[in-house]
Amino acid sequence: MNRIKTIERILNALPLRRTSPKQLQAIMRGMDLSLEALSPYIAEPADLPYGRTCLYRTDAAEAVLIHLPPGTETYIHDHGVSVGCARLLEGTLTNRMFRLDGYGYPCLSGEVEIEEGSYYYAPKKQIHQLRNSGPQRAVAFHLYAPAPAGKSYFPYEQVLDYVI
């Protein structure tokens, strides 16, 4: 059976409203998320600094395949009202978490290194950025519920203060 049809069949059969990242991980464990199975769907970067292939989308859920070449990173963003779980299929990533300062600018609040084969979460309201500092590409499968809507991107500017 076609890989996309398999993902559709699994996700269409599940109630995904009010789902937690851990529940999404359990759903993902029931899928064949091997790099070999998903490699035909890996996209090169085009409009974004990373490749993004939407494999499935309804109002209830979205499944995407992300490809970050070496030295690239996503924009600093959240996932709106969605929660997410992802599995890193190849490479390594750094998940950089942010909080907003009093002016609405993102301030780095922590980083977590993600190893190949690991699962990682995007809880509701998390502001983060994925960075590939490694020597090889990073490929990850992401599952969100509900499908992201109202996603926000956050500007990041370095401001120099000059003392006169």
Image (spheres, rainbow, N blue to C red):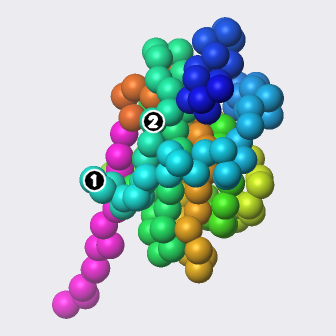
Q: In the displayed image of the protein, which residue is found farthest to the bottom? A: 164
Identify the amino acid type marked 2: Cys
Q: Which residue is mark 2?
A: 54
Seen from the viewer's position, the closer of residues 22 and 63 is 63
Q: Residue 125 placed where, x, y %?
A: 53, 35
Q: Which residue shows up at 58% across the image and 63% down it?
A: 138
Height in image: 53 above or below 81?
A: below
Answer left or right for 53 relative to 38: left
Do we see residue 33 in this rendering?
A: yes
Instruction: State which quarter of the image contains the C terminus.
Output: bottom left
Q: Of the residues under marks 1 and 2, which one precedes in the sequence?
A: 1
Identify the element where label 2 is drawn.
strand
Q: Which residue shows up at 35% across the image and 50% down it?
A: 154
The crowd level at tag 1 (other Cα within 10 Å; few <14, some 14-19, many 20+) is few
Q: Which residue shows up at 74% across the image and 32% down it?
A: 31
* Circles 1 and 2: CB atoms closer than 8 Å: no
Where does the magenta region start and end? 152-164
Q: Which mark is residue 47?
A: 1
Q: Is residue 160 magenta?
A: yes
Marks 1 and 2, how far apart at CA: 14 Å
Q: Residue 47 placed where, x, y %?
A: 27, 53
User: What secondary structure is the magenta-colored segment mainly?
Assistant: loop
Seen from the viewer's position, the closer of residues 105 and 161 is 105
Identify the amino acid type marked 1: Asp
Identify the element where label 1 is drawn.
loop
Instruction: State which quarter of the image contains the N terminus.
Output: top right
